[in-house]
Amino acid sequence: METDQKRIEKMIKKWEKARAVLKKSSKNYQEAFARYHWTAADDGAKWKRVIALRDKETAAFEKADAAWEALTKFVRKRLR
């Protein structure tokens, strides 16, 4: 059986990985958005790519947030 410390370490690792993915996806989205020229002729493909990157960032944020919430919930439960 796992000790609480091992479970906390696993949860922290999971949260850190999720944060790293969030940071990378956020950077990619921000760069794509900054490169997009509103006045340039576009068939929609470039804008759809920006939207897809935004959706990836949103999913990464939700995953990181869920990992953080699970970690804090577990720690608070153990502190009581």
Image (tube, grey):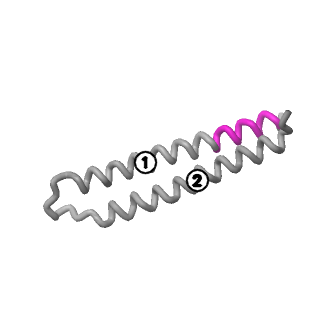
The three-letter code of the residue at mark 1 reads Lys
Residue 23 in the figure: left or right of residue 70: left
In the figure, 18 relative to 3: above or below? below
Magenta range is 68-78
Q: Which residue is mark 2?
A: 19
Residue at image coords 16%, 58%:
42
Residue at image coords 43%, 48%:
56
Indicate the position of residue 47 as horizontal and vertical percent values: 25, 54
Q: Which residue is mark 1?
A: 56
Task: Find the residue positioned furthest to the left.
Answer: 41
Neighbour tally class for label 1: few under 14, some 14-19, many 20 plus, Cα within 10 Å: some
Neighbour tally class for label 2: few under 14, some 14-19, many 20 plus, Cα within 10 Å: some
Indicate the position of residue 52 as horizontal and vertical percent values: 35, 48
Task: Find the residue positioned furthest to the front.
Answer: 1
Residue at image coords 69%, 50%:
13
Determine the CA span between mark 1 and mark 2: 13 Å
The three-letter code of the residue at mark 2 reads Arg
Q: Quadrant of residue 30 in the image?
A: bottom left
